[in-house]
Amino acid sequence: MAGAVDWLWLPLGALSGTAFYLGTTHQRLRPAWRPSAAAGHAWRLAGLLLFALSAALAIPSLGRWPGVFCALSMLMLACVALPWLDQGLRDSPAKRLAAAKATTELPHVG
């Protein structure tokens, strides 16, 4: 039976993808954290270090190449899911409905 440490690479891989995403200028998940050039480099360096730690923890439990590719899969999952989450939080169905009601005009009669 695998211990909790054997599965610690999963959240670390997702956190590495989150750090890479927060290092981009187009992220709106946390607008206050929108990086300058130096802060963007710091976020990307943190993402790289988190990915290396994730791979280092996955390799002993899964093997060399399976560990690297599983850590990379978690990184890619986060990199694909975060923009969708960001867009979904910005354009929720309630916001779209309110915008549609505000722009809908009554037809002119007579």
Image (cartoon, rainbow, N blue to C red):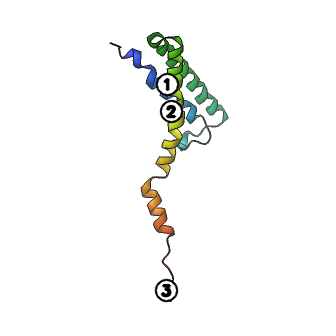
Amino acid at the residue labelled 1: Gly
Whether pointer 3 and pointer 2 mark residues with C-beta atoms closer than 8 Å, the reply is no
Whole-angstrom CA distance, mark 3 to mark 2, is: 52 Å
Q: Could you tell me residue 104's position as x and y percent?
A: 49, 71
Quarter holding residue 21: top right
Of residues 42 and 75, the one nearer the viewer is 75
Whether pointer 2 and pointer 1 mark residues with C-beta atoms closer than 8 Å, the reply is yes
Instruction: Give the label, 1 or 3, closer to the camera.
Output: 3
Q: Could you tell me residue 92's position as x and y percent?
A: 45, 52
Examine the rendered structure and indicate whether residue 44 appears above or below residue 35: above
Q: Which residue is mark 1?
A: 13
Q: Could you tell me residue 29's position as x and y percent?
A: 51, 42
Q: Could you tell me residue 23's position as x and y percent?
A: 59, 34
Q: At x 47% / y 14%, what residue is drawn?
A: 57
Amino acid at the residue labelled 3: Val
Q: Of marks 3 and 2, which one's residue comes earlier in the chain?
A: 2
User: Mark 3 falls on what kind of element?
Assistant: loop
Quarter holding residue 37: top right
User: Mark 1 falls on what kind of element?
Assistant: helix
Whole-angstrom CA distance, mark 1 to mark 3, is: 60 Å
Crowd class of label 1 (few under 14; some 14 to 19; many from 20; radius 10 Å)? many
Q: Which residue appears farthest toward the right when viewing the image?
A: 37
Crowd class of label 2 (few under 14; some 14 to 19; many from 20; radius 10 Å)? many
Q: At x 45% / y 20%, what residue is drawn?
A: 9
Crowd class of label 3 (few under 14; some 14 to 19; many from 20; radius 10 Å)? few
Whole-angstrom CA distance, mark 2 to mark 1, is: 8 Å
Q: Which residue is mark 3?
A: 109
Q: Which residue is mark 2?
A: 78
Q: Which residue appears farthest toward the bottom when viewing the image?
A: 110
